[in-house]
């Protein structure tokens, strides 16, 4: 395997419970890394081996995400901010993985990005902007002119789904506080990202 994506998840259960599940063959789920709230990084699957973390979904035309990605699980139930030690550990890990495999910042995505119809992790409390400031992910510039939202979400890599589902997934990452129908801010942010970081590019 030569990974071209990194997918970030939250466990939704305790770190101990997550470790037991990720290491149980009967569960048929695994991840390359698990990071505790205290910042302990556990390597569970070799990076050059396939892990079963992504499930059904797509990103930038790829359908078998497990075969093209490294999965990182963060111990968090989705209802609270991620701890400082955990975020610092994630940043260190991301830098190393991205350097080893030449993975660009726009190829670091959330589980909700590639499976918007069924997943919401790493959720609204995850600090994507913090990662982007360090070149470990991306963040939009709202100054861009408006453009049709649907075509830009497709250009970014979002899979086919209803307009509402794709808008929800996009906002979950970039505007988790936003409510209501699509607006000009959504269109500007997506246009800026699609121009700078097309999801189909390696």
Image: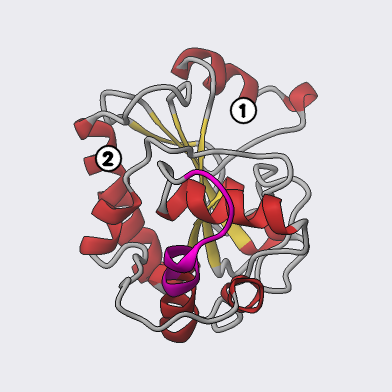
Q: Is residue 66 visible?
A: no
Secondary structure of the residue carrying tag 1 is helix
- For disc 2, the marked residue is 87
Q: Is 77 displayed left or right of 134 in the figure? A: right
Q: Is residue 93 above or below residue 104?
A: above
Q: Is 58 displayed left or right of 77 in the figure? A: right
The N terminus - image quarter: bottom right
Secondary structure of the residue carrying tag 2 is helix
User: What percent of the width, then of the height, locates residue 64?
Assistant: 76, 60
The scheme the figure's colours follow is secondary structure
Front residue of this view, candidates 42 and 90: 90
Instruction: Answer whether residue 184 is magenta in the image.
Output: yes
- For disc 1, the marked residue is 22
Would you identify the image quadrant in which residue 28 lies?
top right
- Extent of the magenta region: 179-189
Q: Is residue 196 visible?
A: yes
Q: Is residue 155 above or below residue 136?
A: below
Would you identify the image quadrant in which residue 52 lies?
top right
Mark nearer the N terminus (1 vs 2): 1
User: What percent of the width, then of the height, locates residue 72?
Assistant: 48, 43
């Amino acid at each position: 395997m030569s990974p071209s994506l990194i997918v970030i998840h939250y466990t939704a259960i305790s770190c101990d419970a997550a470790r037991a599940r990720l290491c149980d063959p009967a569960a048929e789920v695994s991840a390359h890394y698990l990071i505790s709230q205290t910042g302990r990084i556990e390597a569970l699957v070799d990076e050059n081996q396939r892990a079963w973390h992504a499930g059904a979904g797509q990103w930038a035309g790829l359908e078998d995400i497990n075969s093209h990605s490294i999965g990182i699980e963060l111990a968090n139930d989705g209802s609270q901010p991620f701890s400082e030690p955990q975020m610092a550990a994630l940043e260190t890990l991301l830098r190393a993985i991205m350097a080893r495999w030449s993975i660009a910042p726009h190829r670091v995505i959330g589980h909700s990005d590639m499976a918007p119809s069924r997943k919401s992790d790493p959720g609204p409390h995850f600090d994507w902007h913090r990662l982007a400031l360090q070149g470990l992910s991306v963040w939009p510039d709202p100054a861009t002119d408006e453009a049709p939202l649907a075509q830009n979400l497709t250009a970014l890599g979002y899979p086919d789904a209803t307009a509402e589902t794709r808008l929800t997934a996009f906002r979950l990452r970039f505007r988790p506080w936003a409510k209501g129908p699509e607006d000009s801010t959504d269109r500007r942010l997506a246009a800026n990202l699609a121009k700078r970081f097309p999801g189909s590019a390696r």
